[in-house]
Amino acid sequence: MGEASFDAAHGQKPVDGMDLENAGAEKRFSDGGDEKGDPCIEKNERRPGTVVAGRYRICRLIGRGGMSFVYLALDLDSGAERALKEVRRDENRNYDVVRRGLQVETAMLGRLSHPQLPRIYDVIREEDSCFIVMDYIEGRSLGNVLREEGAQPQELVIFWAVQLCGVLGYLHAQEPPVIYRDMKPSNVMLRPDGEVVLLDFGIARQFKRSGSADTTCLGTIGYAAPEQFGGSGQSDARTDIYSLGATMYHLLTGKKSDGAPCDMASICRARPDISPGLGMIVAKCMRHAPAERYQTCEELADALRHCSRLDVRAANERRRRIALFLLPAAAALVGLVMSLGAHLSLVSERRSNYMTAMTAASGLAAQSAQRGQFDRNAFDSLTAAIDLDPSRSEAYLKLLEYCRQTDSVRAGLTAVCSRIDAGVGGIDRCDAVLTEVAELYFGGEGSSFVPDFAKAARYYSMVDGKKVPEAKAFAALAGALSGSSGMNPAGVAEALADVERIEDGQILNEQKIRNYMLCADVWVTNRRAFAAENIDAYAGSIALLEKARAEAEQLMEDERAAEGYAAGDENARAGGGDVASAGELSAGDGDGTGSEAGEYVASAGELSAEGEDVYGMYREIIRNLAAQYYTALTLDSAAADPEKSLAYYGQLRDMTNDAAELRDIDFRMAEVTEATENDGRIREMYAALAERYPDEAEPHLAFCEYLLEHGAGDEAAREFALAKTKKDVELVPNYEALRERLGG
């Protein structure tokens, strides 16, 4: 049944609501509502740079519906990216309906806490607008996945559906239960880590046990259950199960359900290669009568995890019918089919169990990593997922990532390397896992794990050099660093040059940038050994960091061009923007510092989903360049350059919103400014510090020390006297020494 016939059958007229993707293609419907066209963006859209409530600077539009806009915004207080969802009053008479939906969404999410639901940070009400500020979720909606890739593999659909069962089950377990009522692909965001997040609670409702029917008919045609249109009971948990079934149908077949009766045969005709068991599950979810569906999300999730059992049941039924026709002469053939079916069902069940275990383990790991504390349960869950299917790389990589985040790299490497060394599941031939292990051994990680170059060399040598060209060079470099007779500086320098030469020829990607940074770290870590052989370590390190900086800037620029403000706005006007899709990540105010490097701040941060890692690396590169251009002075390196150090510190300052970090940068810039030996500039710097930190003694004591070293005793005494008026001056490290020099 198409939209037109659906409307006629149920007496509903579609109206625009808060569907921020496919606006105009998937309309909401409500009693007596009139269909309206999209509002004029030129009239209503907030322009980039607009500041809402004095705190949220709009970066760009990332989604829109008939009356709703969603912007990517920068929280000027915290420096974090937020999704800013707005509903505006205009000539559309449905403003109050949508505004109430927004208020429902705010109230719902404000009291819920689940890793697969966005958090609410702020609610802003203006005379003609209402905003909610929520998590900016990186990734793309499953609606976009369908448009770009078509029907999805059933293993992925099961993986996502089990996650959605978990979050819907959480909602249904509230008191009173929360019924979501708008499950569909465009309301599910797929994050880069494979997890899903449920968006848009504008039509969710709390279940009223005394109600006989919904008072308002809301939903999305093709996904909404029959009871959402009135006359057949009020919506409850089984309503969401119907919509989840319709969502699975769309993901599996690439086609939206037309609302006609759905059975296993019709699903298998739409997708012939689908598992019969999964077809039976989807069909049961979409039964017209709620009593015939799965009754809880837990029941549905369990069926999805074990859909291979239904495969066996369906296969047995087919075999029984075949046997009736083929008689005993076909017994041998039937036996073969049974054996093959049993084997395939075991493979399918193992895959399903693996996906389920990964979902649960990833959730535990994410919660633990957010707290920054190692959790043995999360660790054990990830290793259990590995053992369910040791040939797959996802659980190994997730385990190593988790251990990196919780400063427990040694435990992760022990677990992974024991399986590599034993050849379990053929994982000793997986380049992605081997490279990650080798990189961790090479670079060290956290406070409790130092590099082990011998092991790094071993695992780099196991990587396929044809697929990962730099692996051989890194193996040689790690070997040179782990020499039994101590490091050979000339040999290491030569190996570093080989790695650099190979990386120069590689295509632009994050790994190339990371490898430049690894090699730069080798130069600086071994600076004393290099200095003993008259090899300029800082020149080598800074040259690599400058290459890494240029590559990172180019990668971010390419991603920004690919997303593009113009393309983003065009997609938004067409209703194609995601609610919190991969978008432009703002690096800061864009003031720059007046330097070549500093001016990049204005554009460095427009990143897509993968770009957050690039931006993090970029900040680290800038931090290292700032420190090394100055520190190189102490080794009399040819790379020493306090002016470039100041430029990069200025850029780093523009990229920072943390008060403690800003303070550290300010005092380091004062230190570097002294190296310029420009007295006027130095005085200006310390005056600015004293003004910026009026309650602190340290700016005055630092200036006092500078003045004493340059023979300005009287002026130094005045600065010291000012410092003594500040609180806790005695705690500043150089206070006692200066007091003795000045005679009290």
Image: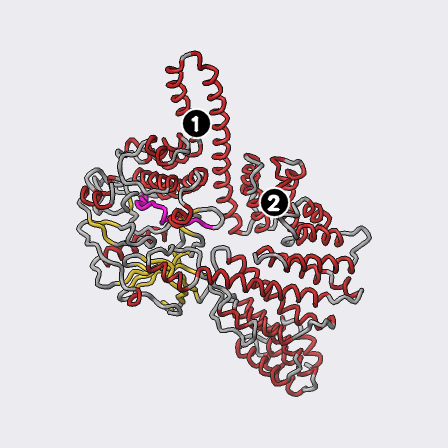
Between the residue at mark 2 and the residue at mark 1, the CA separation in whole angstroms equals: 33 Å
Q: Quadrant of residue 653?
A: bottom right
Q: Residues within 10 Å of mark 1 (few under 14, many from 20)?
A: some
User: Is residue 409 something one can see in this rendering?
Assistant: no
* Three-letter code, disc 1: Arg
Residue 582 pos. (x, y %) = 44, 56
Residue 464 pos. (x, y %) = 65, 45
Quadrant of the frame with the C terminus: bottom right
Taking depth in this image into account, of 739 and 678 the one nearest to the observer is 678
Badge 1 is on which residue?
A: 309
Q: Residue at x 69, y 83 (%)?
A: 708
Badge 2 is on which residue?
A: 433
Question: Is label 2 in a helix, a strand or a loop?
Answer: helix
* Three-letter code, disc 2: Val
Residue 43 to residue 514: above or below: below
Left or right of residue 570: residue 647: right
Q: Earlier in the sequence, mark 2 or mark 1?
A: 1
Q: Residue at x 62, y 48 (%)?
A: 467
Residue 411 pos. (x, y %) = 63, 44
Q: Residue at x 37, y 15 (%)?
A: 324
Q: Which residues are magenta?
A: 177-191
Mark 2 and 1 residues: CB-CB less than 8 Å, in contact? no
User: Is residue 441 something one can see in this rendering?
Assistant: yes
Q: Residues within 10 Å of mark 2 (few under 14, many from 20)?
A: many
Left or right of residue 680: residue 176: left
Taking depth in this image into account, of 240 and 352 the one nearest to the observer is 352
